[in-house]
Amino acid sequence: MTTDILPVAAPAPHVPAPPSGQWTVADYEQLPSDAGRFELINGVLRMAPAPSPQHQTITGLIFFYLFQHIQLAGRGRVFTAPIDVELDVTTVVQPDVVVILHGSKAQITAQRIVGPPDLIVEVVSPGTASYDRREKRDRYAAAGVREYWIADPGHRVVELLTLEGSDYRAEHVYRGKAIIPSVVLPEWQTPTELLFGDTAA
């Protein structure tokens, strides 16, 4: 594969499906730990491409600022991938950053997070952008994830999606010194540009 051809988040037909043809959390748990990074969306097993150094840098920066604002302040917990989030019996995802506030509907178990986190952040790449904006967006809304941030390194912007009923309302796209007006994190005051750092190289 050349640098002009990029992998995408796609179904994993090379992994034998269970007899029913639809994957469940129980089937997902049987996957070998060294088989790769998988997610389960509506009973379909998907394999995610390995993240790039830029993706990991930005994920780390977002985690850093959220960790300071939430975990160090005693408001809840912040996690980064790979960590399983079980949204229902046929959906297990590994978001880039997960926020669980005190009093959340989500439960932190020894194996995974069960239930809808308060905030999920996905850092999109060319291979995951449509997946993050369609399949994942729909599953996060259906599960009741209250807020969803989509960070786009290419444009250095964050799209804010806030849950209204069973669907997301797109607020605005934030960049530069703009502050994301989070409903879940009302005291958030970090300029958006800091979440991307100096990642041009």
Image (cartoon, grey):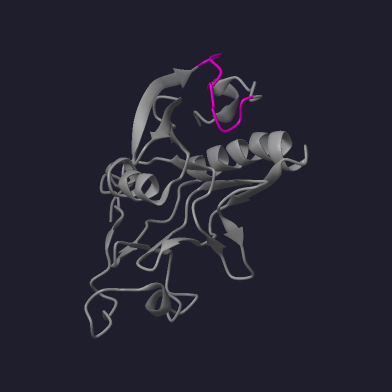
Q: Nearer the viewer, residue 129 or 160?
A: 160
Q: Nearer the viewer, residue 59 or 112?
A: 112
Identity of the residue furthest to the top in this view: 177
Identity of the residue furthest to the bottom in this view: 19
> In the figure, residue 185 lies in which quadrant?
top right
| Residue 197 seen anywhere in this rendered image of the structure | no
| Quadrant including the N terminus | bottom left
Could you tell me residue 31's position as x and y percent?
A: 42, 78
Q: Is residue 33 left or right of residue 39?
A: right
Q: Is residue 117 left or right of residue 160?
A: right
For the point 47% across and 51% down, which residue is it? Answer: 95
Could you tell me residue 77's position as x and y percent?
A: 67, 48
Q: Is the residue 116 above or below the residue 84 in the image? A: above
Q: Is the residue 85 above or below the residue 182 in the image? A: below
Could you tell me residue 201's position as x and y percent?
A: 51, 31
For the point 72% across and 40% down, which residue is it? Answer: 75
Could you tell me residue 18's position as x and y percent?
A: 28, 82
For the point 35% across and 26% down, which residue is it? Answer: 170
Count of labels in the image = 0
| Residue 87 seen anywhere in this rendered image of the structure | yes
Main structural element of the magenta stretch: helix, strand or loop? loop
Q: Is the residue 28 above or below the residue 169 in the image? A: below
Q: Nearer the viewer, residue 72 or 176?
A: 72
For the point 65% across and 21% down, which residue is it? Answer: 189
**Residue 79 in magenta?**
no
**Residue 182 in magenta?**
yes
Look at the image and give the residue range highlighted in magenta: 176-186
